[in-house]
Image: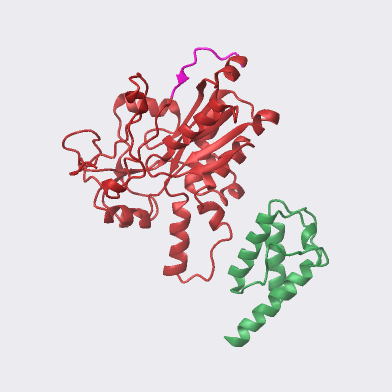
Amino acid sequence: MADVADAIIKMITSRNNYNGGTLQPSDPLDKLGLDSMEVVSLTFDIEEKFNIELPFNANLDIKSKTVADLIETVNQLVAARTKTA
Amino acid sequence: MNRVVITGLGVVSSVGQSTKDYWDSLIAGRSGFAPATLGTAAQATSKLVGEVKGFDPAAHFEQSQLLLLDRVSQFAVVAARQAVKQSGLVLQNELAERAAAIVGTGSGGHTTVDEGFHRLYAEGAARLHPLTIPKAMISAAAGQVSLYCGTKGPAFAVSSACASATHAIGLAFHMVRSGSVTCAVPGGTAASITFGGMKGWEAMRIMSSDTCRPFSKDRKGMIIGEGAAMVVLESLDHARARRLWNLRLLTLTSGAKAEGEERPQSARPCRWRPTAARAGRKEGTRGSGPGRPPPTRET
């Protein structure tokens, strides 16, 4: 689980437009400084790394989501994949 | 109606990545044809191609920018930047709003499509990169030229096979001439030397086994090349206001013929007859030279 969180945090903080500083789990996803291209690119990288499909639509509102929500979603999807494998 | 002048040129080609190198190669009779080396294209054909050898994307773009730039757009942007730089135009404020970017291309981001489909079909990938469509779509190069050069007026692609660039420049000419824009950055770009692309051309059995000799009696066919050529057009009045002199007026009076179109002769996109010739005027025309044997039946 910690591996998932570390990997996602690294993916976020390595983006060009990331605000900088220490990433907090409670940080809202729309306040990280990422532009829309980086958000879909981040989604792709997460899906590729963990072999999952994120239920993400770039047209939907992500304001209510935090980094912790994203990590939790990925953890659940990874667990589901492992269970069915 | 405005008079129209060319005030900037830019080129990325197999025989030069600047107008000077390109021109020097032409004068020296230097060929850019050689066996394919790009990706897996050599596995698809043993024919010669006109690759832009030594083109280094990192010398022109940041890594993050390249995520959005297929090779076809990279060529177009590099050539367009050259043209705008030579023109001396500062595309800001009102001038930017009245500047068009029109790029002709036959097949858009071929490399992106080829690599993406290989991932899907051959490697069994579950997904494509999210920027696949923005990179591959046929208007991608026009959009990127607009972004990088700072034009904020019309930006779109023109596609008519081998006549795409000519049609793009012709269309931009008419827009400047009519006054709908003050200046334009039109031209053409191509980058389809890929495994799939070369298989497609091989299937048509129209590629030359040695070289391309357009208009020669013993011509054997065409050679697939890649690159971009962009120009800057502006009204004569606008150029003169910028104290540009020694300008040569651009006069276009006819459409371009898609000579490279390989469908049956009767199905060509347009039947072309120089209106200049009809009118008895001495004006420039563009000859397309794919080097194919003459048609057996005139339609």
Residue reaching furthest right? A26
Percent across and percent down for residue B47 are: 26, 48
Taking A67 as reference, is B84 above or below it? Answer: above
Taking A33 as reference, is B90 above or below it? Answer: above
Residue at left 48%, top 30%? B10
Q: Quadrant of the C terminus of chain A?
A: bottom right
Q: Main secondary structure of the magenta part?
A: loop
Segment tinted magenta in the rendering: B242-251
Q: Is residue B57 visible?
A: no
Residue at left 50%, top 29%? B173
Percent across and percent down for residue B44 are: 31, 56
Residue at left 71%, top 60%? A12
Residue reaching furthest front? B279
Percent across and percent down for residue B266 are: 28, 47
Relative to B18, is B266 on the left or the right?
A: left
Q: Colour of chain B?
A: red
Q: Which chain is green?
A: A
Task: Looking at the picture, tell me which residue is in the foreground, A78 or B223.
Answer: B223
Relative to B268, is B21 on the left or the right?
A: right
